[in-house]
Image (cartoon, rainbow, N blue to C red):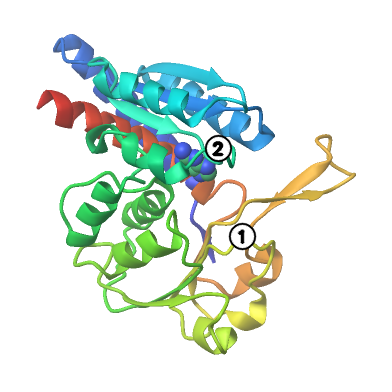
Amino acid sequence: MELLDGKKVSQEIIEELRLEILQRISEHKKIPHLAAVLVGHDGGSETYVASKVKHCEKIGFKSTLIRFEDSVSEEILLKEVQRLNEDDDVDGILVQLPIPKHIDVEKITEAISPVKDVDGFHPVNIGRMVKGLPAHVAATPYGIWLMLQRYKINTAGMHCVVIGRSDIVGKPISLLMAQNTQPGNATVTICHSRTKDLKAMTLQADILIAALGKAEFVKADMVKDGAIVIDVGITRLPDATKKSGYKIVGDVAFNEVAPKCCYITPVPGGVGLMTIASLMMNTMNACKMRTGN
Ligand code: GUN
């Protein structure tokens, strides 16, 4: 069993981007600028956005954090997105989710200019990705794809079983794994809450991607010997032995599943860190697309 080490790979990508920025500075090229919009004070969102801003600083990107209270109106948020669309210095825009229920998340998503949509949530980017055209791909599926690429795992002809059909992970990673690229060229099965015999499906998986959001759901008896297991879950469970009062677990029961695997991603230290690295790559790409170099 070998760990797919998200910490190591994401650090490599961050370092490559940092060196690319030094090169861009010496060539007087534009420095990428990411604008993050945070609504309210959700603990998880605060942590994620702070980490995104910190990584921008580490690489040498410009970043701007724009905060609103929970009570902000849809109209004001739309106006802010429009202002960021029109700000020529801003290359990437993200609105951290979730946002309060009184705001239509689809309206906000579709208001972001597709070229600046570094989250890859805009229907134009999703459509372009489906067609295999250049697009911003959502950070989590792109991070999984990059991880498989960096470990040089030849996925052609493998059976990839994805548990979960979310717009953010399940659907896009299924398409990426099926497309004619390396990684890719896998035969993909998408499983979800209505799948009849889930275990019969997961036992056929050469690559099993767990993205259902249920702590330690995938047990050893659901995994084929020698499988590659990618764990997308992040759940905080109470743990009195930890200083923070909680521990972070994935959708896979790591201790019992890991011995059966050829490769497995740990949680934390797996897919989560890759997500930030791919957001940073999308931001660099947005800048290059906008400036033509
Ligand atoms: N909330 C959880 N994941 C994400 C993400 O990838 N992007 C944004 N904007 N919000 C999120």
Residue 95 position within the rendered picture, expressed as x and y whole percent measured from the top left: 45, 33
What kind of element bears circle 2? loop
Residue 121 position within the rendered picture, expressed as x and y whole percent measured from the top left: 36, 46
Residue contact at pointers 2 and 1, CB within 8 angstroms: no
Residue 238 position within the rendered picture, expressed as x and y whole percent measured from the top left: 83, 48
The residue lying at 41 percent from left, 32 percent from top is: 94
* Label disc, if present, on residue 178 of the rendered structure: none
The residue lying at 52 percent from left, 38 percent from top is: 103
Which is closer to the viewer, label 2 or label 1? 2
* Label disc, if present, on residue 99 of the rendered structure: 2
Residue tagged 1: 213
Q: Eyeballing the image, is 157 above or below 9? A: below
Residue 272 position within the rendered picture, expressed as x and y whole percent measured from the top left: 53, 46
Which amino acid type is shown beneath numbered disc 1? Gly
Nearer the N terminus, badge 2 or badge 1?
A: 2
Quadrant for residue 154, please give it.
bottom left
Q: CA distance from mark 2 to mark 1?
A: 19 Å
Residue 128 vs residue 101: left or right? left
Residue 137 vs residue 96: left or right? left
Quadrant for residue 99, please give it.
top right
Q: Eyeballing the image, is 173 above or below 42? A: below
Q: Residues within 10 Å of mark 2 (few under 14, many from 20)?
A: some
